[in-house]
């Protein structure tokens, strides 16, 4: 792989005298991750990692090997499904689709303080993007995050339109028909 130093894009045509740039993670870095699925699949994946699993390129040069060392199995905690009191029509479920700007979510939560927040499950992620020769980083709320409010007014539906304009990507859906409460 050969990269152009100015645009950092890959050359599609072969050119002589160019250097290949390799990005690598230093040996000994620690990672944390979660594998979910059927027990047999999880065990098979763990066994493959213990032996060593190649990802990426340049395997013959020693790059790309991931080996699981000091593996600790985390116990699984089964939680009871969320049960909300009262009529399901009293609740407003705000679902996040796409990567919603975290600053936007903070503004939304400040605006919704007049309502009662009864449940929240939000995942955050730092992303970076290439913007005119500079990487720009920002925090986003991951798709699938959920906030549930009660005692809200119908103007909460205005968030759907507002998120399209002001959220810098991502969208809020209020009471998506796929989500059901207490059924």
Image (cartoon, rainbow, N blue to C red):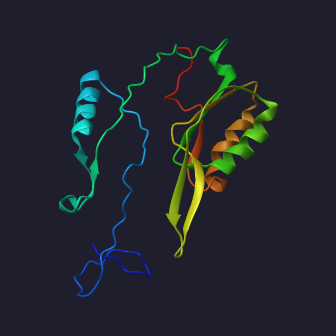
In the rendered structure, the answer to whether residue 78 lies left or right of residue 4 reads: right
Percent coordinates x, y for residue 35 in the rendering:
36, 32
The x, y position of residue 22, in whole percent, is 33, 68
Quarter that holds the N terminus: bottom left
Nearest the viewer among 149 and 119 is 119
Q: Which residue is drawn at 41% across and 75% down?
A: 8
53 and 145: which is toward the camera: 53
Q: Quadrant for residue 31, please give it.
A: top left
Q: Is residue 91 left or right of residue 75?
A: right
Q: In the visual, does 169 lie left or right of 9?
A: right
Nearest to the observer: residue 44 or residue 98: 44
Residue depicted at 44% across the width and 82% down the height = 6
Q: Seen from this angle, which residue lies furthest bottom? A: 16
Does the rendering let one see residue 162? no
Residue 73 in view, yes or no: yes
Up-down relation of residue 71 to residue 67 (above or below): above
Q: Report which quarter residue 168 is drawn in.
A: bottom right
**Percent from the top left, x then y, of residue 128?**
52, 59
User: What residue sits 47% from the left and 18% below the top?
Assistant: 77
């Amino acid at each position: 792989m050969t990269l152009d130093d100015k645009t950092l894009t890959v050359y599609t045509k072969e050119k002589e005298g160019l250097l290949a740039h390799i990005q690598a993670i230093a040996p000994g870095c620690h990672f944390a991750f979660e594998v979910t699925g059927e027990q047999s699949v999880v065990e098979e994946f763990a066994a493959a990692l213990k032996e060593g699993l190649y990802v990426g390129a340049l395997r013959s040069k020693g790059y790309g090997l991931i080996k699981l060392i000091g593996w600790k199995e985390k116990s699984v905690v089964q939680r009871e499904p969320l049960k909300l009191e009262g009529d399901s029509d009293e609740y407003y479920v705000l679902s996040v689709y796409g990567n919603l700007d975290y600053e936007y979510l903070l503004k939304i939560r400040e605006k919704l303080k007049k309502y009662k927040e009864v449940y929240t499950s939000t995942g955050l992620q730092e992303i970076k993007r290439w913007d005119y020769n500079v990487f720009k980083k920002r925090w986003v709320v991951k798709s699938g995050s959920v906030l549930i409010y009660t005692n809200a007014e119908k103007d909460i539906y205005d968030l759907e339109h507002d998120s399209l304009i002001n959220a810098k990507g991502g969208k809020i859906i209020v009471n998506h028909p796929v989500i059901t409460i207490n059924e």
